[in-house]
Amino acid sequence: MNLTETLSKLESLGEEKVRAMHIKNGARENIFGVKMGEIRAIAKKIKTDHELALKLWETENIDARLLAILILKPKALSAEQIEQMVASENFTWAADWFYNYIVKEYPDKEQFREKWMNSGNIMLARAGWSLTSGRIARAPEGIDITAILDRIEKEMPSAAPEIQWTMNTALAQIGINHPIYRERALAIGEKLGIYRDYPVSKGCTSPFAPIWINEMVSRQK
């Protein structure tokens, strides 16, 4: 499939209900409203097509970008391309797809972590905190957790909502995975109160850090 054919296919699968839902959740107007299952089905047929993926990304259409993420070759992207792509996508759903499918799979992703955490770009900072959460949970060696907690306590109340979400994840991961810092993580969560009243579906865990931490720790016992 070429770019024109792929965009036509995506447009034909767009549904106004899906489009309206995404726009309500922060998507820009450049979106057809294709169901995730349909996007995955197209990607399965295409398999990998790096050049097509780059062209799809350049359209800035959200459905096209979601498809692009699934057919890209992460290792074929330069560090500069990845940084530009992260910075250019402000719809958090698409940003999370890019993080999970591309950034996490990039061989030298650690080069981005501290740089992005200190970036003035909201989406780069958001991704930087996601990378830090991953390090905290899976490879904490060399991470100054006390300094991370200091930053969260000081910066999270005034951070952009997009950044707050991943900072909060870092806070929760500290409390869940590092007993020595758990008491302070819980105290910071209670003090800040961020997501205390966040609506949660039945059976799901609240993103409020103290609840999240205590729930996951209880499952470890």
Image: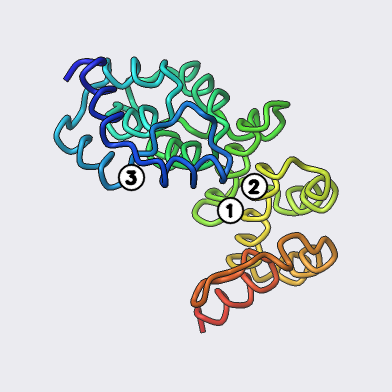
Q: Which residue is drawn at 63% across and 30% down?
A: 116
Q: Is residue 37 left or right of residue 116?
A: left
- Measured in 3D between alpha carbons, the distance from the residue under mark 3 to the one under mark 1, in whole angstroms, is 33 Å
Instruction: Give the residue pinned by disc 2.
Output: 143
Residue contact at pointers 2 and 3, CB within 8 angstroms: no
Q: What element carries label 1?
A: helix
220 to 27, vertically: above or below: below
* Amino acid type at mark 2: Ile
Instruction: Give the residue pinned by disc 3.
Output: 35
Figure label count: 3
Residue contact at pointers 1 and 2, CB within 8 angstroms: yes
* Amino acid type at mark 3: Lys
Residue 16, label in figure? none
Label 2 Cα neighbours within 10 Å, binned few <14 / some 14-19 / many ≥20: few
* Amino acid type at mark 1: Ile
Instruction: Give the residue pinned by disc 1.
Output: 136
Q: Where is residue 107 in the image (x, y as percent from the top left)?
A: 39, 32
